[in-house]
Amino acid sequence: MKSFLPRRPRWRPRWRKRLAPLLTTPLMPLAVVIFGGASGYRLTEGWDWGDCFWQVAITLTTVGYGDQAITSPAGRWVTVLMLLGGIVVVQQTLQWLLSLQETGYFQRRRRWQRMQELQRMRNHVIVCGYGRIGREIAEQLSAEGIAVLVIETDPGRITAARDRHLEVLNGDATLDETLQEAGIKQCRSLVAALPNNAANLYVVLSARGLCSSCRLIARADSGEAERKLRQAGADSVVSPYIAGGRIMAATALRPLALNFLDLLAGSNCEVEEFQLVNNPNLAHEVIGRSLIDLDLGRRSGGALVLAIHGVEGLVANPSGHTTLAPGQRLVVMGSPKQLEALERLLGAALESSSAVQG
């Protein structure tokens, strides 16, 4: 049977929910005293609203400049009632504000706003640990104009990172909630640069479980740690000692090559990786064609394919007859404009791209 009772408006529960915080605090009684006193002065004294609110302010604060005289008995009664009610309400309001300070409400509010700012970050790099290696990584990325978010717990290192104008999250990088606050699902990659192999392993396990598509780079101090980090899901594992030794050996044997990379870093030329999709049906215009047929260098304005990495391994300086296959990774050198043109040419065949050297 259809009910003929009036339907409750849908907006009532919504407005009740919004007004609930005000109803449970002294702010609503304080507003009632202020507006009630101003309305009383307007009715009894006939002042404009500006003078009414001014009289309320000097009355509640007990300043009493005396620049306006209350002439009617009714106006005096308004003042008496406002003083009696205002003393109680103002005292309760001050006590409420002090209790918020003592319970850490404002600190929690600032932290919540900070978390909201961090979660709005997109396509950034998360650096776990701001030690010597993490500091160098953050500086190199910042020099390339890439947004960096540092996760650190040491107060001294947090201060050092903020002095470098870096976004810092004070938290344990091995915890899932910390990585979620850092925007693990919106970042372009994560670098685990903690000094402890076990801590880096926990970071990689947590990050891989939260976001399977995130590129993970981890630091390792031994071959065994490198093997376990790769098993945990790290895309790339770097040992500072091994990498440093290889660079020093290469400097002794091939100094010109390393000098070339240093010159490349200070120029407008970049080296970028282009990952091709594994599904050939999505990129039939590119997959299965040779470099000569595609003519990528001329059509992109001068981009040079340095190497191609696929199932057969790494092919350096590929010839024009080299055929592109699904899942290959192209290492290309060129200016930013040329690399952008090449990215447009690859189109649907391109799964992702990342800078190698800038």
Image (cartoon, rainbow, N blue to C red):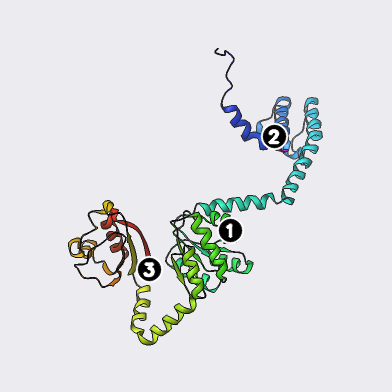
Residue 24 is one of the magenta-drawn residues: yes
- The spot of residue 91 in percent (x, y) is 79, 41
The stretch in magenta equals 23-29
**Which residue matches tag 1?**
175
Q: Is residue 311 above or below residue 5?
A: below
Element type at marker 3? strand
Q: Quadrant of residue 7?
A: top right
26 with respect to 319 (left or right): right
Identity of the amino acid at label 2? Leu
Q: Quadrant of the C terminus?
A: bottom left
270 with respect to 26 (left or right): left
Identity of the amino acid at label 1? Leu
Q: Of the two numbered discs 3 and 1 on the same chain, state the one appearing first in sequence.
A: 1
**Which residue matches tag 2?**
23
- The spot of residue 307 in percent (x, y) is 29, 70
Give how far apart the Cα atoms at labels 2 and 1 are.
38 Å
Residue 160 is one of the magenta-drawn residues: no
Q: Quadrant of the N terminus?
A: top right
Element type at marker 1? loop
Q: Pick out the residue farthest to the bottom.
A: 252
Q: Could you tell me if residue 177 is visible in this image? A: yes
Q: Is residue 311 above or below residue 29?
A: below
Q: Of the two numbered discs 2 and 1 on the same chain, state the one appearing first in sequence.
A: 2
73 with respect to 141 (left or right): right
